[in-house]
Amino acid sequence: MADEGERPTGWLTRLTDCPNARAERYARSHGATAREVMTDRVVTVAPDASANHVAHLMEQHGIRRVLVAEQGRLLGMVTRTDLLRALVADRPPEGEVSDERIRGAILAAMQRESWADTLHTAVNVLGGEVEFHGFSRSASVQRALRVLAENVPGVERVVDNTQPLRPLLES
């Protein structure tokens, strides 16, 4: 939960499923407010916190989720599932993936995303370094392309040399 300034104030927890608590659960689910059912034990991390640090906090506090906040503003959360996915991601040791395979994987991933534009964006890979050239529709697309490339096994570095795509007819 967050207040009007989007600062984390509590965590919404699941109600228990006990036979004796059905009436209470009914009353809570149909009439309780989020503030009444949330926990006030909030654990947050900065956006650049390592996965290892987040896992340590989860273990230390016995929790399954950690909120991500910056300057008191809620940005998102990391779950145990998120950490598990990061842990078991099939990343081969450095040097085992050819540049052509990296490029092919990036292009294939771009083709699966509606926001990625393979017509106006070229991808070059040399020594595990990915370079994007051409045009992008927005800063969000540029960031998403970086994240997409960083998640491809074998990528060492990403350089974005794209330029903003301007409308064909400007007033």
Image: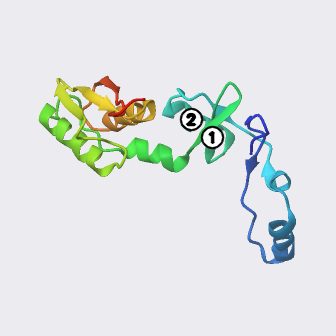
Looking at the image, which residue sits at the far front? Answer: 171
- Badge 2 crowding class, 10 Å Cα cut-off, few under 14, some 14 to 19, many 20 or more, is many
Q: Nearer the viewer, residue 67 or 75?
A: 75
Q: Residue at x 15, y 31 (%)?
A: 99
Residue position for label 2? 54
Would you identify the image quadrant in which residue 154 lies?
Answer: top left
Q: Is residue 156 above or below residue 42?
A: above
Does 156 sit left or right of 6 as displayed?
left
Q: How many marks?
A: 2
Q: Report helix, strand or loop for mark 1.
A: strand
Q: Nearer the viewer, residue 4 or 1?
A: 4
Image quadrant for the C terminus?
top left
Q: Is residue 59 visible?
A: no
- Residue 152 is situated, as x and y percent measured from the top left of the image, at 29, 38
> Mark 1 belongs to which amino acid?
Val
Q: Residue at x 86, y 76 (%)?
A: 23
Q: Report helix, strand or loop for mark 2.
A: helix
- Residue 106 is situated, as x and y percent measured from the top left of the image, at 25, 40
Q: Is residue 54 above or below residue 163?
A: below
In the drawing, what numbered circle is on residue 66?
1
- Residue 103 is situated, as x and y percent measured from the top left of the image, at 18, 36
Query: Alpha-carbon distance for marks 1 and 2?
Result: 7 Å
Question: Do residues under tags 1 and 2 come within 8 Å of each other at their CB atoms?
Answer: yes
